[in-house]
Image (spheres, rainbow, N blue to C red):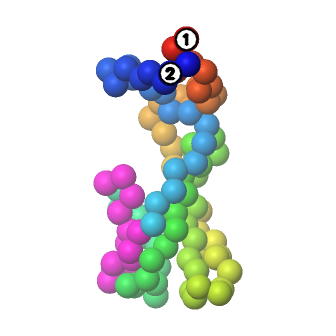
Amino acid sequence: MSFAFDPSTELPITKGRLHFIRWVGERGYVNILNEPFFVNKELCCEYIWSTIDTFEQKLFIYHQAAEEARRTLVKSIDYKLREPVMERIPVKHFHKV
């Protein structure tokens, strides 16, 4: 069995999560997928962890003050997608026998 994928095939947005690590600029913004989001000016020069949940259509922004500290939710923002969200595509869909 081998794996095959045709890059010319357009894949739908599926239920899941996308994670990003971003640096907060001096004005308190981060850039995610070429869109600016205000986080918090007090987090200037810190890194945040952000997650887009495609099913909930929300962006969650977390900060972890120190390595041993717990990650805390800074804010959640509605993140409406421009196309419908589909069920995940099973990996077997890409197998060639």
Q: Please, which residue is most extreme toward the top here? A: 97
Q: Is residue 3 left or right of residue 92?
A: left
| Most foreground residue, 26 or 19 | 19
Examine the rendered structure and indicate whether residue 43 appears above or below residue 55: below
Q: Is residue 77 visible?
A: no
Where disc 1 sits, the SS reads loop
| Most foreground residue, 23 or 84 | 23
Q: Is residue 85 magenta?
A: no
Quarter the C terminus occupies: top right
Q: Residue at x 61, y 37 (%)?
A: 15
Q: Position of residue 78 (x, y in %)?
A: 55, 53
Q: Residue at x 48, y 39 (%)?
A: 81
* Res 45 → quadrant: bottom left
What whole-number distance in Å separates the C-alpha atoms at marks 2 and 1?
7 Å
Residue bearing the label numbered 2: 2
Q: Position of residue 50 (x, y in %)?
A: 52, 63
Q: Is residue 23 magenta?
A: yes
* Res 24 → quadrant: bottom left
Q: Is residue 14 visible?
A: yes
Q: Please, which residue is most extreme toward the front here? A: 1
Residue bearing the label numbered 1: 97
Q: Position of residue 93 (x, y in %)?
A: 57, 18
Q: Position of residue 95 (x, y in %)?
A: 54, 19
* Res 35 → quadrant: bottom left
Q: How busy is the neighbourhood of tag 2: few (under 14 within 10 Å), some, or many (20 plus)?
A: few
Q: Which residues are magenta?
A: 22-34
Quarter the N terminus occupies: top right
Q: Which mark is residue 79?
A: none
Q: Amino acid at mark 2?
A: Ser
